[in-house]
Every structure is written in structure tokens, then in C-alpha cells.
Amino acid sequence: NAGVTQTPKFQVLKTGQSMTLQCAQDMNHNSMYWYRQDPGMGLRLIYYSASEGTTDKGEVPNGYNVSRLNKREFSLRLESAAPSQTSVYFCASSSRGIGGVGNYGYTFGSGTRLTVV
Amino acid sequence: DAKTTQPTSMDCAEGRAANLPCNHSTISGNEYVYWYRQIHSQGPQYIIHGLKNNETNEMASLIITEDRKSSTLILPHATLRDTAVYYCIVRALTGTASKLTFGTGTRLQVTL
């Protein structure tokens, strides 16, 4: 049972380059999320997808785009990378629910460590 | 979602109970209290959640005060592997997606 899988685990980009971070979950979860974590900081929400076919902006969406390819996959794209986007990126998924039995919160991937030089 | 306040850091001796407090004085009636932890640079891990009753699972216990304005996460017998940053989060589970908002958490250091 893989849970949430993120690729790549590490990446170095030059300023202005583009790349796509991949995320896939095998838990049949409806909702998926992208967070970034800067050193010594908490996680900040970039984008999320409540269900297949929908995406919404989070707290820090500028400079990013997302695609909910299907129920399993949610990708994050940096069109023109900047040094300020150096961070650790976490993907997460959750089942849709209203609390109580069956709602066990989010499952996170192991992260992608991105450095933009 | 309601804001939470946690101490920046705490120490605990291995084998002893670790009690991590969280203040959420502006919590609404439909908001749950969630706890996550992040070990080193791994992805956060769900620990436990509750609404108003105390909860216990294989990892921890959650004690919520009667007025729900604060809570305590209890790790009954802390080990070195429990060294991590612990996040207390409150959120309402309404709408089509339930978003978690992370603060800076409490850095728990378990020592020999």
C-alpha cells in the first residue's frame, strides 16, 4: 500500500526553467493538496483539488499551476522557476467526509526538495 | 478556521509522558481539533482528532477541555522516535474540501 507517491524526490533548477512535480495516491481519496514548506516554517497551501475535475487556489498560488489529471493524480507545475520557490513540496490527499468514523485526516507524501539557482 | 497557539519547544525524558498543550480559544462549535507531527523533514503524519470528547488511539490521547478552548496531546511513554514537530490544527469539516492550515507547531525533543 503505497499511499501518496511524489516524484522526483530531489530537483535542482536554473532560474527560468520549468518543471512538473508529480503526485499520485492509491487510496481512492477524493481531495488532493499541494503544500510548500520553507526552512523553519509551517506548511503553506498552494493549490487543492476537492474532487476530480476541480482545482482551487490556496494561500500561496502565485507562480504555480496545477492539473487534476484523474482521481489518482494531481500535478504541480512551475512555469518559470524563481529562487523564491526553493522549498520542500508536499502532496497530500484526504477522503471527503464530515468528520467522525472514517475521517482520518490527510495522508502526506514524502516530499520533493526543490532548489532553484 | 480558528487560530491555535502552541509553545515553540518542549523537552521530555524518554519513558515519561509528553503533554503538549494547544490553545484554541476562538474555536467554533463545528470545528474539530486535529494533531499531526512531522519527523525531521518527512511529510506530516496524522495522529488523532476530536470534537469535544476525549479520544485515544494507539499513538496518543487527546484531552479537550469542557469549554473546548484548549486541548492537550498526550504521548504516554515518549521514545526518542517521538522527537518531532507537533502541529495542533482546528478546522471545520464543511464544504467540498477540508483544508488544513499549519502553524509553526511545537518542537518536542525526547532525551535519554
Image (cartoon, rainbow, N blue to C red):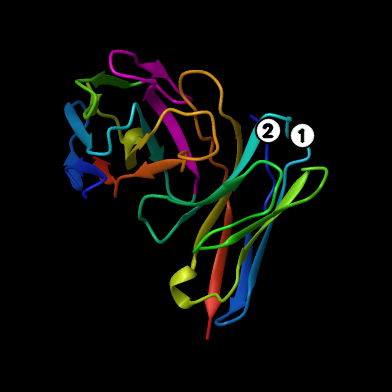
Report the residue that reaches farthest toward the bottom.
Answer: B112
Magenta-span inclusion, residue A56: yes
Which residue is denoted by mark 1 in the rendering? B26
Residue B91 drawn at (x, y percent) = 60, 33
Query: What residue is rendered at 57% in x and 47% in y?
Result: B49
Q: Which of B22 and A20 is in front in this view?
A: B22
Q: Specify the amino acid type for callout 1.
A: Thr
Residues at circles 2 and 1 in contact by the CB criterion of under 8 Å: yes
- Find the magenta span and give its range: A41-62
Quadrant of the rendered image containing residue B62: bottom right
Q: Are there few (<14), some (14-19), or many (20+) residues within 10 Å of tag 1?
A: some
Marks 2 and 1, Cα distance to the nearest angstrom? 6 Å
Q: Which residue lies furthest to the front in this view?
A: A101
Q: In which quarter of the image is residue A57?
A: top left
The answer to whether dots 2 and 1 both sit on one chain is: yes
**Residue placed under numbered mark 2 in the picture:** B2
Disc 2 chain ID: B
